Amino acid sequence: MKLNKLLWASALISVSFACSDSGEEKPLGKYDNGILIMNEGNFGTNDGEVYYLNPNTEELLPNIFEAENLRPFAGLLEDMVLEADRLYLVANTGKVEIVNPADFKSLGAVSAELDQPRSLAVNGSKLFISDYGPYDASYATPDSYVAVVNGLDGGVVSKKIEVSDKPEDLFSYENYIFVASSEANKIEIIDATQETVVTTIELEASPKQFNAEGGILWVYAIATDEVIFYTLNLSSLTLENSYTVPVANATNRISFDGDDKMYILTSSGYPDYNDAVVTIDIEGNTATATELMTGSGFYGIGFDDDLDQIYVANSNGFQGNGTVTVLSETGSVIRSFEVGRGPSGFLVY
């Protein structure tokens, strides 16, 4: 399962009031200041859920979707996307739940005509949802698409835009939706008005995540025994630079710290699951990788830009609940705590 841009840590809110769209100040909500922990859930049980952590007080609130809506989430959580004062909870079991991030009360949903949604982006008044599509007889996904929904609070799918196999992360810019087409090693760009693919950018690696920072759009991609970071020129819709870093067994789990440093997880996979946390520094034209921590069962990574702390999620083999370990930037363990089933991502805001 992918760990998408919910791992890109934005600055923590440090004031007691937030501004509304009208410019008026309003008190922060119950969940407005902290870290959301995405617990994917167990396959077959569909018990994905969200925990809330206040990193300053270490208060941890479990199962906040069910607590605020008096019903279980009932899906496998794939992504959490904060857009347009709404939080979109994407379940790869075929739905998107939409909540108010301040109090986690439901605002709507997309629950029909989706197959295996992966991520979401907002453009104007439309939702664009990447979806693997259904499996065929060989368990391939040749009918992948990006679903379009007219309305920020959900509703029905109005169109399915055909894209290459296994689309992952999405990024919205002006009138465009960028699609990380992971199996085809390309970025496909959709015109949000025409609702069709208008440009394709070929890559030498499998794109997994976008991250916009300082006017630059970064693309994290994986190749054999190395990772590549591409930068895109948003004005010309072309590639600018690329940075190749030798890293064996890189996964799609990544978090950006806001200062040209990235944290990724590596794993040897079955049967040994020799895993590691690797930090990558990009300075000028050079990129270096440093191993910070080794272990087994690493399943998610995040970064708190306010406290300069790294969050490492461990699935514990899906044998019961998972755990989260908090590290310093040098890799020293600060503390650990138990969370839900299959913790796989963090949204810091």
Image (cartoon, grey):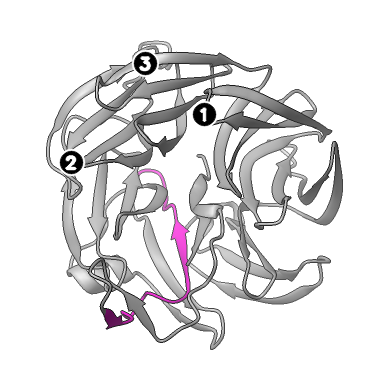
CA separation in Å, label 1 and label 2? 35 Å
Q: Quadrant of residue 129?
A: top left
CA separation in Å, label 2 and label 3? 25 Å
Q: Nearer the viewer, mark 2 or mark 3?
A: 3
Residue 161 x/y as whole percent? 29, 19
Callout 3: helix, strand or loop?
A: strand
Residue 33 x/y as whole percent? 44, 77
Q: Amino acid at mark 2?
A: Ser
Q: What crowding class fits label 3: few (fewer than 14 Cα within 10 Å), some (14-19), or many (20 or more)?
A: some
What residue is disc 3 on? 197
Q: Quadrant of residue 131?
A: top left
Q: Is residue 340 visible?
A: no
Dot placed on the residue nearer the N-terminal end, 1 or 3: 3
Q: What crowding class fits label 2: few (fewer than 14 Cα within 10 Å), some (14-19), or many (20 or more)?
A: some
> Magenta segment range?
25-44
Q: Amino acid at mark 3?
A: Val
Tell me, for residue 132, which label it has, or none. none
CA separation in Å, label 1 and label 3? 17 Å
Residue depicted at x 52% and y 23%: 237
Callout 1: helix, strand or loop?
A: loop
Seen in the picture, residue 129 relative to 299 is either above or below; the reply is above
Q: Amino acid at mark 1?
A: Ser
Q: Is residue 323 visible?
A: yes
How many numbered marks, from 0 up?
3
What residue is disc 2 on? 111
Q: Magenta segment: does it hold 298?
A: no
Residue depicted at x 36% and y 11%: 137
What residue is disc 1 on? 235
